[in-house]
Image: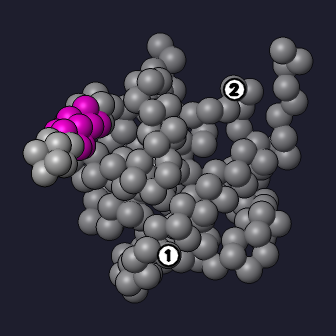
Amino acid sequence: MQKVMFSLVVLAVVILASFGNVAQAAYESITSDYKIQKALLVLDAHGEGATVRTLVRKNIQIKFTDLAMMSPAYMRYNALAAKDSRNNQYIFIDNKHKSAPVEALAALLAHEATHQNIVYGASIDEETQAHCNEAKFWIKVTASNPSLKNNPHPLVVRENTLAERYGDKGRDAIQTMVASNSSYANLPQRVPSSGR
């Protein structure tokens, strides 16, 4: 009986180690940055495995960059989901967040991943959903590690603000915040479906 139990424990360890290696290889296929890989692991470990699998399946490349160098209009952005002329998809995270905790980066990725699932274009509704996904993830990850909220990094301050607004008044508070943000001033409320 002890041999069987020992064998089962060894088998479980081997399976978990293999999963970690497979996950690491998958993360490496979409980012070379170790900190972003760790943020993907945090997303996966906190119930967002489907989100991570979508990013990997769609080969969405994730990297840190100076968003202001891409365009002065992006100077105040935290991250940006984009496509190039060949329809390759990217998530660019501003360099100012390289020192953010991986959990805060994971929350930001929960936001940006929302944009990767939209077919018809940007809208206030899409931005609202992305901000809600970010807030919900931050609430989840800080429930198991409340001390994260005490980090003074600007991305953590953003996450705390979103979580507080979402926790107090839900989606409506987030939608009001998004609709009043000048970055989204030209977006329609919603983008009509193509009827497919």
Residue at image position (77%, 63%) is: 171
Q: Position of residue 2 (x, y in %)?
A: 13, 51
| Left or right: 29 in relation to 55 | left
Label 1: which residue? 143
Nearer the N terminus, badge 1 or badge 2? 2
Q: Position of residue 90 (x, y in %)?
A: 44, 33
Residue 10 in magenta? Answer: yes
Q: Nearer the viewer, mark 1 or mark 2?
A: 1
Label 2: which residue? 119
Residue at image position (46%, 67%) is: 141
| Left or right: 6 in relation to 39 | left
Element at badge 1?
A: helix
Q: Which residues are magenta?
A: 9-23
Compared with 150, 114 (above or below) is: above
Residue at image position (69%, 76%) is: 167
| Left or right: 27 in relation to 166 | left
Gap in Å between the C-alphas at discs 1 and 2? 33 Å
Residue 156 circle label: none
Dominant SS type (magenta): helix
Q: Could you classify mark 2 by the number of other residues whose Cα lies within 10 Å: few (under 14), some (14-19), or many (20 or more)?
A: few
